[in-house]
Image (tube, rainbow, N blue to C red):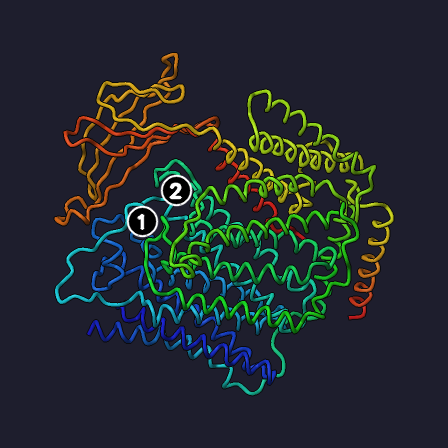
């Protein structure tokens, strides 16, 4: 009896993940899956760019960048950030 | 749970891995998201079944079920509980299951973490990870199954027990750490491969895996350092690194991974070195698999050869498949991989990173060649020519010192290029200290590499110190903060940069420890109770020698009183000579083992080994080694781990 219980338990433990795995195939066709919306992606990009600007300023402050390079790269990054902010405002 | 459940779980895991690969492959063709969800869930199911199999084997080891061959081979009733658990990775089939177990943890984390992220990359990431899982499932299902029953026609009353060398707490932690390192590189490799397939070779995949790579690198580093610590504590030859093939196997991916960690900074900041980064991550992953092959195939004679097997060809085929598929795909994506920017000056930080990368790869090649040369020479000429520490030291010491120099030079260089005026301004302080220390060390009668190494340590320390100083000065003048607050905020706001510098300081301390090896002294002697022996300014008196029977071994114990030249008491040492399985009627199965005792200070270690005892039990044969500065290797290791944790610490956005 114990052996039967053991095997039954094992069978259930093994069957559940298999059922869970094939369950989506039983659904009607899905056109999209849950994914981060574009607003979240833009927000994340904005944070990364802000970080890069801060790092750039730090590099310049400790003398690892010359002035011309610093100004050019900061303005490039700022343009990118302002484009993202504009896009975020639209949404 | 019955042992058969473990076998069934492994079978199901293999089936699910194949199905996961197929469904995701068809998803890529049809874009039917049901297939994606199924493939993703099958990936999770593979991991679930592997967890069950690992749990079943661990349970069988704990309850000493000797009906399973693996349990009977690596444990006995006398094996302490902690070593019954560590027996999971002591043998071949168990360790392969353990590899799979860690990969399954990483697989689960990757899938759950990216459920709503990186939707274009994820199908191929899961496919790549499932292929790797599938490979290890082939091994554990069809070649070396850990659930194989014991092949006897009588009841096995007790098992063999664990090799005494493995009955050490460090050894219980070292392999899992190393495996976490080896296995972890599957994730960055999977993202890289997916980026190649999807022609998305910019910075996206780099950002997705930077943290993974750093965590994995940390585990691998800790694993290697713990391995050295174990060798030093257990093997009784007084060293921590012997260029043993298995040590080299873990060192090679560490070298390429370290190069990769540096060069992805360039890709992230400057969008350069795209091809180079792909090459490095492919090499790192291939070397991880190759390392497992070296450890598990028995092709190399090594202190780590606890197992012998015929797995070699299977591993080699898998390594070739990885290399051919990855480099083949790179060939077809070469136009996408070309970076839009080029390095502009030799005195730029970009160049510093590139030189550092080249040195890492050169060391890796030298180690690879030295490790494989005996096998290649045997295959071609029939004679096995052994390549020992002298070859590795001769090649790697000068290259390693160049790398140490670059550790200091790199941070002093500016991005894009450093003007002559800046070069003079930045290099004057560290170079002056380097020269002064070189003169001072020469004055103390040091020569050659020792002087260069110690002086370079001073140079790198000065360079890093000046970087910290500049950062603090920048904050105090810009924000008017106090020095202490500026120091804290500087690290807090730039964790990866200053965490990296702390790691470099750890490396400097380790180099100090390595260089101390040049001053090692040793003596081997026979001594009776009451007698004295002098070794390198220390006197050793054998005050007592006695025997003791313990649960799993028999021990001869010697008490050594250590005093200095003036008779001042330093310490008592108690090395032991042990015989494990001493009750086994078959004398050949009894295993002798020397348990060391080490007195460790910042300055030097006094290392004692009880080699043997005379037949009349009157004379103890003792080996004493005085090893200067060894402790700095371990302190450097702690600092390396601490710096990495700082670099990894998540920041609030």
Residue visible at 69% across and 43% down in the picture:
B410
In the rendered structure, find residue B167 and report the number of the disc placed on it: none
**Residue B478 percent across, percent down from the top left:** 80, 38
- Mark 2 or 1 closer to N-term? 1
**Residue B486 percent across, percent down from the top left:** 71, 36
Task: Determine the residue located farthest toward the bottom in the rendered image.
Answer: A28
**Residue B400 percent across, percent down from the top left:** 58, 42
Residue visible at 34% across and 60% down in the picture:
B92
Q: Quadrant of residue B591?
A: top left
Disc 1 secondary structure class: helix
Disc 2 secondary structure class: helix
Res. B549 visible in picture: yes
Compute the Cα span from label 2 to label 1: 20 Å
Q: Is residue B539 above or below residue B602?
A: above
Residue B615 horizontal side relative to residue B285, left or right: left
Q: Is residue B220 above or below residue B25?
A: above
Nearest the camera: B197 or B610? B610
The chain letter under disc 2 is: B
The chain letter under disc 1 is: B
Q: Are marks 2 and 1 in contact (CB under 8 Å)?
A: no
Confirm whether circles 2 and 1 share one chain: yes
Mark 1 neighbour density, 10 Å: few (under 14) some (14–19) many (20 or more): few
Residue B370 horizontal side relative to residue B67, left or right: right
Residue B574 horizontal side relative to residue B35, left or right: left
Q: Please give the residue where the numbered disc 2 appears in the rendered image.
A: B231
Q: Please give the residue where the numbered disc 1 appears in the rendered image.
A: B82
Mark nearest the camera among 2 and 1 is 2
Nearest the camera: B57 or B33? B57
Res. B119 visible in picture: no
Q: Is residue B349 above or below residue B293?
A: above
**Residue A7 percent across, percent down from the top left:** 27, 74
Task: Determine the residue located farthest toward the front in the rendered image.
Answer: B381
């Amino acid at each position: 009896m114990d052996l039967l219980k053991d095997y039954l338990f094992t069978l259930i433990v093994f069957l559940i993940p298999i059922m869970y795995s094939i369950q989506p195939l039983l659904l009607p066709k899905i056109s999209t899956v849950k994914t981060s919306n574009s607003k979240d992606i833009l927000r994340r990009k904005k944070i990364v760019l802000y970080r890069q600007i801060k790092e750039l300023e730090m590099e310049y402050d400790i003398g690892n960048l010359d002035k011309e390079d610093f100004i050019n790269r900061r303005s490039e990054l700022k343009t990118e950030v302002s484009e993202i902010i504009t896009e975020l405002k639209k949404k | 749970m019955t042992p058969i459940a473990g076998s069934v779980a492994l079978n199901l895991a293999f089936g699910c891995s194949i199905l996961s690969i197929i469904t995701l492959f068809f998803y890529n063709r049809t874009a039917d998201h049901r297939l994606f969800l199924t493939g993703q869930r099958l990936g999770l199911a593979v991991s679930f079944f592997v967890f069950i199999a690992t749990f079943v084997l661990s349970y069988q080891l704990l309850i000493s079920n000797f009906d399973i061959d693996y349990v009977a081979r690596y444990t006995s009733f006398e094996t302490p509980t902690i070593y019954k658990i560590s027996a999971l990775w002591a043998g071949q089939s168990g360790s392969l299951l353990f590899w799979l177990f860690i990969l399954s943890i990483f697989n689960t984390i990757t899938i759950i973490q990216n459920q709503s992220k990186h939707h274009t990359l994820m199908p191929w990431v899961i496919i790549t990870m499932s292929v790797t899982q599938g490979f290890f499932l082939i091994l554990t299902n069809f070649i070396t199954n850990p659930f194989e029953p014991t092949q006897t026609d009588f009841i096995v009353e007790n098992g063999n027990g664990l090799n005494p060398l493995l009955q050490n707490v460090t050894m219980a932690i070292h392999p899992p750490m190393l495996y976490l390192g080896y296995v972890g590189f599957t994730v960055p490799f999977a993202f890289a491969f997916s980026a190649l397939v999807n022609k998305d070779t910019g910075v996206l995949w780099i950002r997705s895996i930077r943290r993974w790579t750093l965590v994995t690198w940390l585990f691998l580093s800790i694993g290697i350092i713990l391995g050295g610590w174990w060798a030093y504590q257990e093997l009784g030859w007084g060293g921590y690194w012997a260029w043993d093939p298995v040590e080299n196997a873990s060192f090679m991916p560490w070298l390429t991974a370290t190069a990769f960690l540096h060069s992805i900074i360039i890709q992230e900041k400057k969008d350069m070195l795209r091809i180079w980064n792909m090459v490095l991550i492919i090499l790192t992953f291939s070397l991880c698999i190759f390392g497992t092959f070296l450890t598990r195939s028995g092709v190399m004679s090594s202190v780590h050869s606890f197992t012998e097997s015929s797995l070699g060809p299977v591993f080699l085929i898998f390594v070739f498949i990885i290399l051919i598929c990855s480099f083949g795909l790179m060939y077809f994506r070469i136009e996408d991989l070309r970076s839009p920017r080029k390095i502009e000056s030799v005195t730029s930080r970009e160049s510093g990173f590139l030189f550092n990368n080249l040195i890492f790869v050169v060391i890796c090649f030298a180690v690879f060649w030295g490790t494989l040369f005996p096998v290649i020479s045997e295959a071609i000429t029939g004679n096995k020519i052994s390549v020992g520490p002298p070859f590795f030291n001769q090649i790697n010491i000068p290259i390693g010192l160049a790398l140490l120099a670059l550790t200091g030079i790199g941070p002093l260089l500016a991005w894009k290029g450093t003007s002559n005026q800046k070069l003079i301004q930045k290099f004057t302080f560290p170079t002056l200290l380097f020269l002064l220390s070189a003169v001072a060390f020469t004055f103390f009668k040091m020569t050659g590499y020792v002087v260069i190494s110690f002086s370079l340590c001073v140079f790198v320390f000065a360079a890093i110190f000046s970087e910290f100083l500049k950062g603090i000065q920048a904050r105090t003048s810009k924000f008017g903060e106090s020095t202490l607050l500026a120091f804290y905020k500087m690290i807090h706001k730039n964790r990866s940069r200053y965490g990296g510098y702390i790691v470099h300081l750890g490396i400097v301390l380790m180099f100090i420890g390595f260089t101390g090896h040049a001053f090692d002294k040793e003596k081997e002697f026979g001594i009776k109770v009451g007698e004295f022996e002098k070794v390198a300014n220390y006197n050793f008196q054998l005050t007592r020698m006695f025997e003791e029977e313990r649960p799993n071994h028999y021990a001869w114990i010697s008490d050594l009183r250590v005093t200095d030249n003036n008779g001042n008491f330093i310490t008592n040492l108690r090395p032991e000579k042990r015989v494990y399985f001493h009750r086994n009627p078959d004398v050949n199965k009894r295993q002798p083992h020397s348990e060391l005792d080490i007195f460790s200070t910042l300055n030097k270690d006094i290392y004692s080994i009880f080699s043997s005892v005379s037949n009349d039990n009157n004379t103890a044969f003792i080996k004493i080694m005085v090893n200067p500065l060894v402790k700095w290797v371990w302190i450097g290791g702690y600092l390396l781990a601490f710096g990495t944790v700082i670099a990894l610490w998540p920041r609030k956005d």
